[in-house]
Image: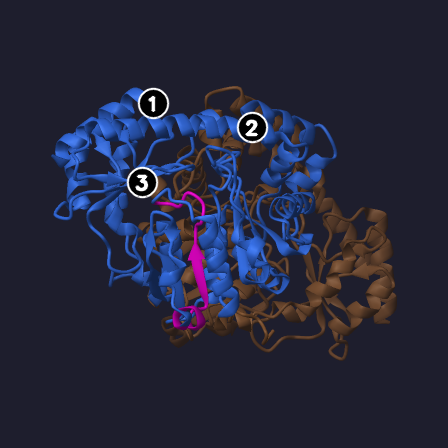
Chain colours: A brown, B blue
Amino acid sequence: MSSDIWQFSQRAAALQSSAIREILKVTELPNVISFAGGLPSPNTFPIEKIKHAVDIIMDSDEAFSALQYGPTEGYTPLREWVKNQINQRENTHYTTDNVLIVTGSQQALDLIGKALIDNGTKVLVETPTYLGGLQTFTQYAPHYVSIASDEQGLDPDKLSDDDAKAANFLYTIPNFQNPTGRRLSAERRKKLAQKAIKNNLLMIEDDPYGELDYQGHRLPSLISFAPENTVYLGSFSKILAPGMRLGYVVGPESFIRKLVQLKQAADLHTPSYTQHIAYQVVKEGYLASHIPTIRELYKTRCEFMLTQLEKYMPKTVRWTKPEGGMFIWVELPEHIDTTVLLAEAIKHNVAFVPGETFFATNPKRNCLRLAFVTVPEERIEKGIQILADLIK
Amino acid sequence: MSSDIWQFSQRAAALQSSAIREILKVTELPNVISFAGGLPSPNTFPIEKIKHAVDIIMDSDEAFSALQYGPTEGYTPLREWVKNQINQRENTHYTTDNVLIVTGSQQALDLIGKALIDNGTKVLVETPTYLGGLQTFTQYAPHYVSIASDEQGLDPDKLSDDDAKAANFLYTIPNFQNPTGRRLSAERRKKLAQKAIKNNLLMIEDDPYGELDYQGHRLPSLISFAPENTVYLGSFSKILAPGMRLGYVVGPESFIRKLVQLKQAADLHTPSYTQHIAYQVVKEGYLASHIPTIRELYKTRCEFMLTQLEKYMPKTVRWTKPEGGMFIWVELPEHIDTTVLLAEAIKHNVAFVPGETFFATNPKRNCLRLAFVTVPEERIEKGIQILADLIK
């Protein structure tokens, strides 16, 4: 690299290509049973509905605006739809000015990192937490403080007032968290929100999986308890289609205004074309009938995987029992390093994501994440059996 | 702002909301004759062709991959198409690994700023240059050095070896530059490339307007003279539709690999959906018949505006005579401040972009940029007449 005619910035030079990501590239081969991906099931993509939406747009004058540059804030009718959804569900009082459409909620994480992190800024995260959030924030060189979690999610009692005061924000995924599948309990949501208000702490509430609640009874979001202390990230990736790259940010107006400035520099605006399609699909309530079909599929698949874990895993192995979402978190006996296990598993054509990558500090080496929604049942059984044998 | 519970990062706090952008918001009203926008003409959007492409995708199994997560590098067939186009046109020898698809070439600028600029990094820019490039790079706090330009574009003789050696890169738009409409002469391209090679200087060659050459005879790009010293940015915004937000980066493989890491953190990948559509549209050579229709429209509109400038403007006013692209750059007598003039012009329902925003250093206050491609001829005449009266 030293012969390059350019010099990478410190932030760029510090970026490592992930060894695990390289290993996982082989899992795209069709003979590999992969529990590694975070992909939604393509069976849930509403292809006919999207096709119909495109036809309506392209057969009218709307085609011109769907294909033209648009405002950085996003397509106004889609922003209004988001605002109405959130206000109705969470009993909040946002206006359209509180909403920014982003090119997938990963972009929201990057804009938030840019907006809030200087070298050494204190950032609170869950233990473990979303790998993509860590990768993005790390570019801006924060000082992470990991807050302990248990079966009910992040534990507000383990968040000290001192840390809450000193941190610029807390990053959390209250619903069916990636990687653990855990949901923050109702009581803890309230307690966390109170702690945030008391200590002037900003919470980034990342919620890509909130609608994937198998029983269909959502818990109130952090924004409903502490709207002035919370920036909420929503996504169409798991309820419509991730290939659209559509997400949104809802938060205090002065915060959204700053994100708009940063987004303008980042990509001018989210594609008008996909925003128009998404609005056309959702505007008349289609999701109310569509989302239950996703929940049903994911619930069945999750229950099946839990049954196989029960059937094959040795007694020393523990795992989460998700009430929604796409992931199960497995804890093995302490002497097993799951990165080593992965190399073995791949030789037997099975893949998963080792747990250590999901920790901001002090990685645990004996955990792993299993994704189940894209794997057919017979392959789930076979894959779990192979993993169990390797663990034994 | 001091009452906010969060603290913006230094880079975010330094971002100013542009006063001119605020003024120009009024220009979206239908009674305003706006020469301010940088929008392509919606008459050039190939609506039927896109509709047909969507039908083909949505009626086949391709729908599933068009709606699913995709690789950060971009949709492989589209990357291959880009590689082939460039190699054929520029006589280069790139492989698909030299190509990254981005969410509009504005994103390429942001990723490049992130990759190459630390606080105080020396960056060479044209005088004047693209506003959106400056806004994006400025987030990362570079030290700008402006290189003088004249009618033939950037002047390589004004670029000293010392500056070329000390800078991490040069940012340039050789074809029908934004804001001046100028094209870098063939001789200067060669000279600039030689200077870059001699001094180990990286050039960022931004080329959104290259295909909009009214006579249809492109000059060779900087990549054809100095491929190892050049990163090339292309865009579908002006030849297909900007609402798709599709651009690409072509450059040395180790550079592309770093951009891929940064892009993954920025938005995971460019929407699969729009990439599949674009590929479906272009794969069988559609652009070869489509682009000449855009050139013809823009040429006619440009000639018409030049005629009106000739007819109405006082003798003290000078302007560029573009051979392609979307912009004319107008220089007024030195005592006229075009930001003040804009406020007057808007009272008369005419808008343009004052020139000062396009300078990285030492802004000239007596220049302005006129965009002509979206304004009908009768309104061009009326608008220029009003501007000329105000200047007199």
Q: Is residue A115 visible?
A: no
The residue beneath circle 1 is: B376
Q: Is residue A229 left or right of residue B243?
A: left
Q: Is residue A218 left or right of residue B63?
A: left
Which percent across, then down, holds residue B85? Answer: 63, 43
Q: Relative to residue B107, is residue A192 depicted above or below? A: below
Q: In the structure shown, which secondary structural element does the residue marked by tag 1 occupy? A: loop
Dot 3 and dot 1 within a common chain: yes
**What separation in Å lies between label 3 and label 2 (alpha carbons)?**
27 Å
The residue beneath circle 3 is: B320
| Residue nearer the viewer, A300 or A235 | A235
Q: Relative to residue B61, is residue A331 depicted above or below? A: below
- N-terminal of the pair, mark 1 or mark 2, is 2
**What separation in Å lies between label 1 and label 2 (alpha carbons)?**
21 Å
Task: Identify the residue at image location x=26%, y=47%.
Answer: B355
- N-terminal of the pair, mark 3 or mark 1, is 3
Magenta range is B162-179
Which mark, residue B286?
none
Find the residue positioned furthest to the front: B187
The residue beneath circle 2 is: B290
| Residue nearer the viewer, A373 or A11 | A11
Q: Badge 3 sits on which subunit?
A: B
Image quadrant where one finds the C terminus of chain A:
bottom right
- N-terminal of the pair, mark 3 or mark 2, is 2
